Image: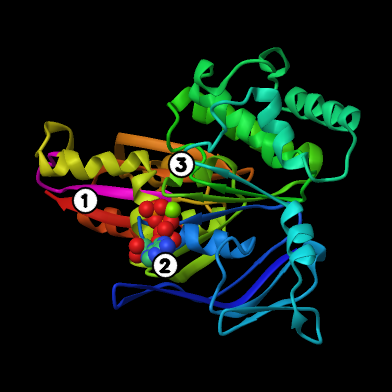
């Protein structure tokens, strides 16, 4: 388990201070894939760099798996319940259990794939034969054995990121921190790296913290997510709940950015014929979640209320095994029937938003 409590970090730069992380508390369970999303400058990278103490926080406590309690006061790091100054050796042991990958891979250009992956094992006390066996095991894990003698410049972006993942996992860490690891990749390479991370999470029970500014990445592999804004975690929960019921404006923004139904906003702006309504018609956005099942809703309102429904846009996805999505549609019927249909939808956990009235 990873537990962060009241973590803060302020930078001072030329007399100006930036509160990069403000009083953040978070818990990540073993084996979870936990997303951290936020706009540029929100403090995401600083937060994860504090997790392996690459960045020393100003204050707060953290525990990463069996690291023991780490307390930071005034930028000084203490270890254990009785708060002894943390020794270099304890710090290194802690870091060995945390792997990290980055947006720009950070590979050694003059070293081969094999040497890159072997690098973190250099001072581990392992013999050459043990290191060689471990590197080959890692290359197999990321499906790159045939590239062992290639140099980074001879690899595609996706392959470079695979090398970085193999290197991060070479010391058999229990936790992998991923800082925008897919943002420099094309969609296919992104998909394959996400699939690899998902399989490592399942196969090795690896806990993954995924930093990203793309909701699609969160949706694709995370189970929990924290939304960061201006150094704070402003919303946190299961990915399904966050997507189904975002509360903060920034979260609504992120959720909308990943929703196909949002294309309706552009259609409305452009006054597309698709979203024009005649007198007595109503353009609505209906949102379904696991408590409301889409197709029976449609047949009910046309059958029981005599309201016709024509679909403009529809998109339903499966998140955590449950359906989530909705449609934009034009409702047509007499005023009383449409009103009863909308009331019925509300009662059945379908969120209704009227976009246009004819
Ligand atoms: N070493 C540093 N010195 C001074 N200010 C810093 C330093 N590192 C980060 N900051 C500032 O702290 C804030 C948070 O930065 P951080 O890199 O954590 O954001 P981020 O959420 O990772 O952004 P991005 O999505 O662009 O990577 C920013 O205002 C940044 O300018
Ligand atoms: Mg960053």
| 204 or 285, nearer to the observer | 204
Q: Earlier in the sequence, mark 3 or mark 2?
A: 3
Question: Please, what secondary structure does the residue beneath circle 3 have?
Answer: helix
Q: Residue at x 53, y 36 (%)?
A: 105
- For the point 57% across and 47% down, the residue is 178
Which mark, by number, is residue 346? none
Give me the residue at 73% from left, 17% from top: 145
Q: Is residue 286 magenta?
A: yes
N-terminal-most mark, 1 or 2: 2
Badge 3 crowding class, 10 Å Cα cut-off, few under 14, some 14 to 19, many 20 or more, is some
Query: Do callouts 3 and 2 mark residues in contact (Cβ within 8 Å)?
Result: no
Nearer the observer: mark 1 or 2; the answer is 2
Label 1 vs label 2: CA separation? 34 Å
State how far apart marks 3 and 1 are (Cα): 40 Å
Image height of 80 relative to 119, above or below: below
Q: Estimate the x, y position of residue 202 in percent, counting from the top left.
A: 76, 39
Percent x, y of residue 233: 48, 69
Magenta part of the protein: which range? Answer: 276-287
Viewer-closest of 86 and 356: 86
Tell me if I can see residue 348 in this picture. Answer: no
Which residue was labeled with disc 1?
334
Q: Quadrant of residue 41?
A: bottom left
Q: Is residue 257 above or below residue 132?
A: below
**Left or right relative to 329: residue 196:** right
Q: Which of the numbered marks, if any, corresponds to residue 247?
A: 2
Numbered tag placed on residue 216 in the rendering: 3
180 left or right, relative to 25: left
- The N terminus - image quarter: bottom right
* Colour mapping: rainbow
Badge 3 or badge 1: first in the primary sequence = 3
Cβ atoms under marks 1 and 2 closer than 8 Å: no
Callout 2 secondary element = loop
């Amino acid at each position: 388990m990873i537990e962060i409590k009241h973590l803060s970090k302020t930078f001072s730069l030329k007399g100006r201070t930036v509160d990069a992380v403000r009083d953040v508390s978070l818990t990540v369970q073993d084996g979870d894939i936990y997303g951290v999303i936020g706009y540029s400058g929100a403090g995401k990278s600083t937060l994860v760099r504090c997790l392996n103490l690459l960045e020393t926080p100003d204050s707060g406590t953290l525990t990463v798996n069996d690291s023991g309690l780490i307390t930071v006061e005034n930028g000084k790091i203490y270890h254990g319940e009785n708060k002894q100054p943390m020794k270099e050796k304890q710090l290194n042991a802690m870091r060995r259990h945390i792997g990290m990958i980055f947006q720009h891979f950070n590979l050694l250009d003059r070293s081969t794939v094999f040497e890159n992956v072997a690098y973190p094992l250099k001072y581990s006390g392992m013999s050459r034969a043990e290191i060689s066996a471990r590197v080959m095991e890692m290359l197999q894990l990321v499906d790159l054995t045939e590239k062992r003698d290639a140099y980074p410049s001879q690899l595609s972006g996706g392959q470079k990121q695979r090398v970085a993942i193999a290197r991060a996992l070479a010391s058999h860490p229990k936790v992998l921190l991923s800082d925008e690891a897919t943002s420099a990749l094309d969609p296919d390479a992104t998909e394959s790296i996400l699939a690899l991370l998902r399989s490592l999470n399942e196969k090795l029970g690896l806990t993954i913290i995924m930093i990203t500014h793309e909701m699609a990445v969160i949706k694709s592999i995370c189970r929990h997510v924290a939304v960061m804004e201006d150094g704070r975690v402003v919303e946190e929960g299961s990915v399904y709940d966050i997507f189904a019921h975002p509360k903060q404006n920034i979260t609504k923004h992120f959720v909308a950015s990943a929703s196909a139904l949002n294309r309706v906003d552009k259609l409305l702006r452009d006054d597309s014929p698709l979203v024009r309504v005649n007198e007595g018609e109503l353009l609505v956005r209906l949102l379904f979640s696991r408590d409301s099942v889409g197709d029976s809703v449609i047949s009910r309102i046309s059958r029981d209320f005599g309201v016709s429904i024509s679909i403009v846009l529809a998109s339903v996805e499966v998140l955590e095994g449950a359906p989530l999505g909705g449609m934009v549609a034009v409702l047509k019927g007499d005023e009383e029937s449409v009103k009863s249909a909308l009331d019925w939808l509300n009662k059945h956990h379908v969120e209704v938003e009227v976009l246009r009235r004819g």
